[in-house]
Amino acid sequence: MTINELVDSSAYAYYINSTINNTLNLQVPGFTFDPYASWGASIDLKITKAFTLKYGIFQLSSLRGQNTASANDYLGWNLSTSNTDGLAQALKLEYAYAPQREGLKVCLDKLKEGIYLRANDSCKQLGAVENNLPKPLVQLGAYTAGWQFPYLDGSGQTGSRINGIFIHGTTVPFKFPFGHGTSLWASAVLSSNEEINQVPFAIMGGSISQGVIPSRPFDQLVLGFSRSSLSGNSTYNGSSQVYSALAELDYVIKLNERFSIEPGIQFIFNPSGNNDYSTIVAPTLQLTFAF
């Protein structure tokens, strides 16, 4: 299992780039990325209908790689343990302030079956479609990890601990200039120990709109961005890294309840982190099967 389930949120799964939908912006050197595996355990405590407390503890190990800086090089199920292993822990408080997911209001076109117009005051036949937008949430969490983490400057020194906090919020769907409903979201991660942590601060955000095309009421238009502030101890081609940023635009085509196609485009600004390379423009395509 991985730490993702404790530090991600309902909006992240709509995106393709790993600065949003994985843990590239929440750095714990040596921790596994999906689909790699480690030992771990987690527990969810339902405090009230709206509040949930989540905790997890996970293994940090160099046994899946050549050294502590590349613990994910091993492509396989090596679940061994060692007395040199470390531990990563995360705690998250989740507030579902709108637990009831209501359908999105639409205006039915009497002349064209299957056409769903934006709901408005003059509509004579209101209806509703299934709400496929992310669950409205506010999340506040913290994580800590103890191990022999290598310094980023290649000096051979090691640090023993990384700590961090993260916050996330997703709005309830509201009316935008297009679509049947739009959710906005934003996240931030602040971490300690810049000498071993490549991303000490990151911000992310975006919007997800459903039904922007009248004949496609369940499709989603996805816009996101992230900015990763990089450690001054991290270098590329001999120069210190400062930041890297991303803008992502996708369109999720829902073919049925289980299968969707998501074409998109990504703009990666300052990809090397030190202004050595110009912006990368990358077309993307993701296929999703739900089981």
Image (cartoon, rainbow, N blue to C red):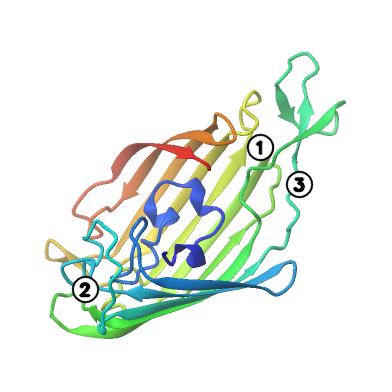
Residue pointed to by mark 3: 102
In this rendering, the answer to whether 144 lies above or below 283 is below
Mark sitting earlier along the chain (2/1): 2
As helix, strand or loop, the secondary structure at mark 1 comes to: loop
Q: Nearer the viewer, mark 2 or mark 3?
A: 2
Say if 176 sits above or below 276 in the image. Answer: above
Q: Are marks 3 and 1 in contact (CB under 8 Å)?
A: no
Q: Secondary structure at mark 2?
A: loop
x%, y% of residue 45? Answer: 64, 74
Eye-nearest disc, 2 or 1: 2
Q: Cβ–Cβ below 8 Å for labels 2 and 3?
A: no
In this view of the protein, which residue sits in the foreground, 119 or 57?
57
Q: Is residue 135 left or right of residue 258?
A: right
- The spot of residue 119 in percent (x, y) is 77, 33
Q: Which mark is residue 68?
A: 2
Q: Is residue 174 left or right of residue 77?
A: right
**Residue 65 sits in which quadrant?**
bottom left
Q: Residue at x 55, y 36 (%)?
A: 258
Tell me which amino acid carries mark 3: Glu
Question: What residue is at 37 percent from the left and 80 percent from the top?
Answer: 87
Rendered residue at 17%/75% (across/down): 153
Q: Is residue 48 left or right of residue 284?
A: right
- Mark 2 residue type: Thr
Q: CA distance from mark 2 to mark 3?
A: 47 Å
Q: Quadrant of the N terminus?
A: bottom left
Labels 2 & 1 near each other (Cβ < 8 A) = no
x, y percent for residue 169: 60, 62
Q: Earlier in the sequence, mark 2 or mark 3?
A: 2
- Pick out the residue farthest to the top: 111
Mark whose residue sits in front, 3 or 1:
3
Instruction: Name the residue type under label 1.
Output: Pro
Residue identifier under label 1: 177
